[in-house]
Each structure stands twice: as C-alpha cells, then as structure tokens.
Amino acid sequence: MQPTMKSSSKGDLNRLSIGIQDVPQPAQLKTLFAKNGGFLRKTVSGLGKVNPRELETVVHSLHQQAFEFYDCLKCANCCRSISPAISHNDVDVMAKKLRIRPSEVVQNYLQMDNDGDFVFHEAPCPFIDQENYCGIYSHRPKACREYPHTDRSRFYQILQLSLRNAEICPVVYAILMKLSAKNPGN
Ligand code: SF4
Ligand code: SF4
C-alpha cells in the first residue's frame, strides 16, 4: 500500500523533535538500514506528496537540532565511505592549501567517475586522519561542506539522495525515521 502523507498533517510534522537517543551509532547504521530500508523507501515516496515548504521547514529544524548535539568527529562515515563530487574550483582551492599545482591534485588524489565528475580515487578520503579530522578542512570541497544536505533549500528535490544518505549518515537516518513516525502509510 502506498503511504498516505497527502494530507499535510502540518501540526504533527511541526511537533517533531530529535534527541541523541534517536541518532544511531555509526557502526550500527548498515544493520539498521538493512532492517528498515524498505520502510524508509515508503516514507520517502510519501514525502513527495507533502507540501514542499512544510517539509523543508521540518527537515531544517530537525537538522539544526541534531547537529547541535551530534559530533561528526565521532562518526566520519561520509568521509570514510563516499566521495564528494569535486569541481574545478574545488581543485584550485585544494591546490592552494596543499601548495601544489591543480594538475598535481588531480594526478595525486582524484579520478573521474561515470558521470564525468572528479571524485577522490580512494575511500576513506586521503585527507581524513585517525581521529577523523580533515587535513584540508578550511579548503575542503563544497560538497563536503554541504553534506548531508538536510539544510539545503528545495529539500523535496533530494529525497532519493537522502534515502541513499540514510545508509551512510546517522543524522539523515534519524531524520527520515522521525518523518516515518508521522507517515500513516507506514
Ligand atoms: S576532504 Fe575532508 S571533509 Fe571532504 S571527504 Fe575528505 S576528509 Fe571529509
Ligand atoms: S555528516 Fe553525517 S555521516 Fe558525515 S560525519 Fe556527520 S553525522 Fe557522520
């Protein structure tokens, strides 16, 4: 049965809040997603029917709440498992930080993926250290700064991306699970 989030359920969504107990340990995420991925898929399908502005307001609020208490240094799942898309401008910025030529950044750290985007040639990212600090933090690619995108505008456009990110980012997983609780189709 399809989820039934057509009705805006505005009051309900606006009452959502997120706490530390809602965000899983990074190491648990694969197992939890394997268990609840189908449930979250239905949720995401239902969210496509929610008023986009309402959805964005709620997701931004949950994002803000979560990152007030959640410490990415205890996670780094994103840096360890996926690569950002890296633009030519990102390459120039990284080259400045590393004090090498842009062509050397490409040669030493990047490859082109099937979509024609530069990505890091290895995972974990070559710039993450043992304690999860980024070696080029002030000069990191734009996509790193924006990840996990739950505070971006037009959130309704990245529902499928967010579903994929729920397998990587504990905060995205927690946000979608919170939204699921208000989805009468689940
Ligand atoms: S550049 Fe920094 S923020 Fe981006 S993936 Fe690598 S370690 Fe993470
Ligand atoms: S953005 Fe998400 S996946 Fe990346 S370190 Fe923070 S909580 Fe972990």
Image (spheres, rainbow, N blue to C red):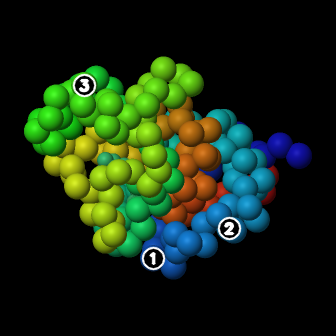
From the image, tell me which residue sits under label 1. 20
Q: Position of residue 172 (x, y in %)?
A: 51, 56
From the image, tell me which residue sits under label 2. 32
Inspect this view and state whether residue 153 appears.
no
Residue type highlighted by circle 1 = Ile
Inspect this view and state whether residue 122 appears.
yes
Which of the two marks, 3 or 1, is nearer to us in this view?
3
From the image, tell me which residue sits under label 3. 103
Q: Position of residue 179 (x, y in %)?
A: 60, 56
Q: Position of residue 61 (x, y in %)?
A: 40, 55
The residue carrying mark 2 has its beta carbon less than 8 Å from ligand 2: no
Secondary structure category for the residue under label 1: helix
The residue carrying mark 1 has its beta carbon less than 8 Å from ligand 2: no
- Which residue is depicted at the point 31% across and 63% down? 129
- Which residue is depicted at the point 50% across and 58% down? 169
* Residue 142, quarter of picture: top left
Tell me whether circle 2 and circle 1 mark residues in contact (CB < 8 Å).
Answer: no
Q: Position of residue 184 (x, y in %)?
A: 75, 55
What distance separates the C-alpha of mark 2 from that of mark 3?
41 Å
Position of 161 compared to 90: left or right? right
Which residue is at the front of the view, 156 or 89?
89
Density class for disc 2 (Cα within 10 Å; few <14, some 14-19, many ≥20) is: some
- Which residue is depicted at the point 38% across and 72% down? 74
Secondary structure category for the residue under label 2: helix
- Which residue is depicted at the point 60% across and 66% down? 29
Residue type highlighted by circle 2 = Leu
